[in-house]
Image (cartoon, rainbow, N blue to C red):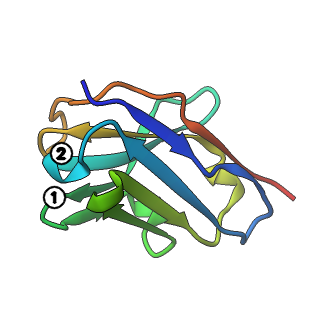
């Protein structure tokens, strides 16, 4: 399975920005769908944003217009630019890959440690 290392989290005030990075153990161009997920305390892990190898992008409704997902094949890395962060964005953020965009498509990677994002004044 593909392995991932997430970084870039931190403590930020409401309205602030962070850029998360996820480095994959193999070329991201070979991974059809790359995703960012998050898990808040006491809640289930949720899908936040997805990008395919063709450049198709899907966002969860609550982050549309604020978050931007991108991929850099040369660096085996995907990014999540997060702007106008709000307290409800506080969570551990993870990346992973899937074989398809449809809900329920199987994961093709293993979960990393994630990176903590805390939005608080």
SS state under label 1: loop
The disc, 1 or 2, on the residue closer to the chain's N-terminal end is 2
Q: Quadrant of the N terminus?
A: top left
Find residue 109 and report its image quarter.
top left
Q: Is residue 75 above or below residue 66?
A: above
Q: Is residue 97 visible?
A: yes
Residue identifier under label 2: 31
**Circle number at residue 36:** none
Q: Residue at x 51, y 66 (%)?
A: 81
Residue identifier under label 1: 53
* Image location of residue 54, percent across then percent down: 12, 65
Cα gap from disc 1 to disc 2, whole angstroms: 7 Å
Mark 1: give few (<14), some (14-19) or many (20+) Cα within 10 Å: some
Q: Residue at x 68, y 61 (%)?
A: 86
Q: Nearer the viewer, residue 6 or 16?
A: 6
SS state under label 2: loop
* Image location of residue 46, percent across then percent down: 42, 39
| For residue 77, side relative to residue 63 (left or right) | left
Q: Residue at x 34, y 25 (%)?
A: 110
Q: How many marks?
A: 2
Mark 2: give few (<14), some (14-19) or many (20+) Cα within 10 Å: many
Q: Is residue 7 above or below residue 73?
A: above
Q: Nearer the viewer, residue 31 or 27?
A: 27
């Amino acid at each position: 399975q593909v392995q991932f290392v997430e970084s870039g989290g931190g403590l930020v005030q409401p309205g602030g920005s962070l850029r998360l990075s996820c480095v994959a153990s193999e070329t991201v161009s070979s991974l059809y769908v790359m995703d960012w997920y998050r898990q808040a305390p006491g809640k289930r892990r949720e899908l936040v944003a997805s990008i395919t190898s063709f450049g198709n992008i899907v966002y969860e409704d609550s982050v549309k217009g604020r978050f931007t997902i991108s991929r850099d094949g040369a660096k085996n890395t995907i990014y999540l630019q997060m702007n106008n962060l709000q307290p409800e964005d506080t969570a551990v953020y993870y990346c992973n890959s899937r074989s398809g965009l449809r809900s329920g498509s199987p994961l093709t990677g293993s979960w990393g440690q994630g990176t903590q994002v805390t939005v608080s004044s």
